[in-house]
Image (cartoon, rainbow, N blue to C red):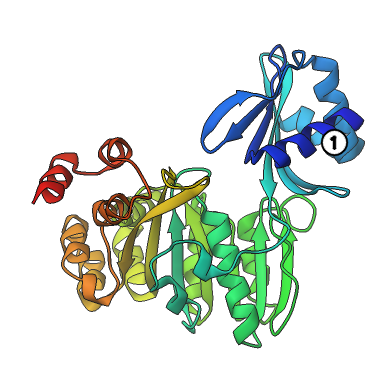
Amino acid sequence: MEFLQELLSQALKSGASDVHLVVGLPPLFRIHTVLEPAGDLSPVTAEQTVNYVKGLVGDERYARLVANRDLDFSTEVPNLGRFRVNAHWQRDTIAVAFRAISDTVPNLSTLNLPPVVEKFVDLPRGLILVTGQTGSGKSTTLAAMIESMNHKYAHHVITIEDPVEYELRSKKCVIEQRELGSDVPTFASGLRHALRQDPDIILVGEMRDLETTSAAITAAETGHLVLSTLHTQNASQTIERIIDIYPGEQQNQIRSMLANTLQAVVSMTLFKRADVAGMVPACEMMICTPAVRACIRENRIHEIPNIIATNRGIGMCTLDDSIKALLLNGKITRQQAISRAVHPESLLRAMSA
């Protein structure tokens, strides 16, 4: 375990976001999206990964890993900080992925998000979704939103996470954090019981199945503010994903419920910065105006991108417009912009205009 602590300490000093232990390969660091060996170290052995995981989770949860072949958990390394961890089997050996978690929740205003996101913390009810691929900053954004509320309002906040990442300490808000596996068996179970715990705000780590999605929408419909994430790339895809989770005979009903409860979708794509070390997000921003709600209710999802493009004045933004702004401000390179744009040809024409 001493070697593991030294390895994680080296990762933090190197600015790595992730550490990977795969049997037969040397330890790997992900630094600003690039995966590279962690110095001149020997390949990891199967015995090492078993010992590391057992040392971190104990025999009972290790048995769960053996049974389920995957285990998500968080851990705190003394004098270093917290890490989100996934242990999993691959080729009959255990591999481990560590994600570094900051000791402090960042201020929402420092995350380079559209200014309108700061207004979402003032909403009394409804559903706010933050979407994007793994590692795009969804958890950090949601934690920063909760922390902003924590300084402004005397709310009761319940989070259901897999695992708990940022430690949110009660200030004006009373904050309870429940972790899958140790505090609550499933997201859906945690959501159902949360409604009896007098919450104002519920954070659901991920809307990953029908039961969780249904419970989250019901919570939003009954007057709570619900925050959650999906692994989708834009607002239209997010809405379609939610509707497609439901059986066909229920889809008209869920369109109506979603049209009534959804407040906003923030879809994030993370870029390596070109001007300084670090990362910066480009965001598609959809706010649920009456026009957007009508599109959801009437199954005209294909019209939503045009509504987003024509409502910049109220804070909406397409991904390509966000990428263009980052490029014009020198925060990303031209190559990055073109490679990640939704419509690269249109972006090129806009740049040359």
Whether 172 is drawn above or below 49: the answer is below
Q: Is residue 168 left or right of residue 140?
A: right
Whether 327 is drawn above or below 34: the answer is below
Q: Is residue 244 left or right of residue 43?
A: left
- Figure quadrant of residue 198: bottom right
Name the residue nearer the viewer: 229 or 138: 138
Question: Residue 58, position in %: x, y?
Answer: 90, 38
Question: Residue 1, position in %: x, y?
Answer: 90, 31
Which residue has dot 1 on it? 5
- Figure quadrant of residue 165: bottom right
Q: Is residue 295 left or right of residue 285?
A: left
Whether 41 is drawn above or below 157: the answer is above
Residue at point 64%, 41% (across, down): 15
Residue at point 77%, 13% (across, down): 42
Question: Residue 169, position in %: x, y?
Answer: 75, 72
Residue type at numbered disc 1: Gln
- Figure quadrant of residue 120: bottom left
Name the residue nearer the viewer: 56 or 195: 56
Name the residue nearer the viewer: 337 or 14: 14
Residue at point 66%, 56% (across, down): 161
- Residue 257 appears anywhere in the view: yes
Residue at point 36%, 68% (across, down): 258
Q: Is residue 229 left or right of residue 3?
A: left
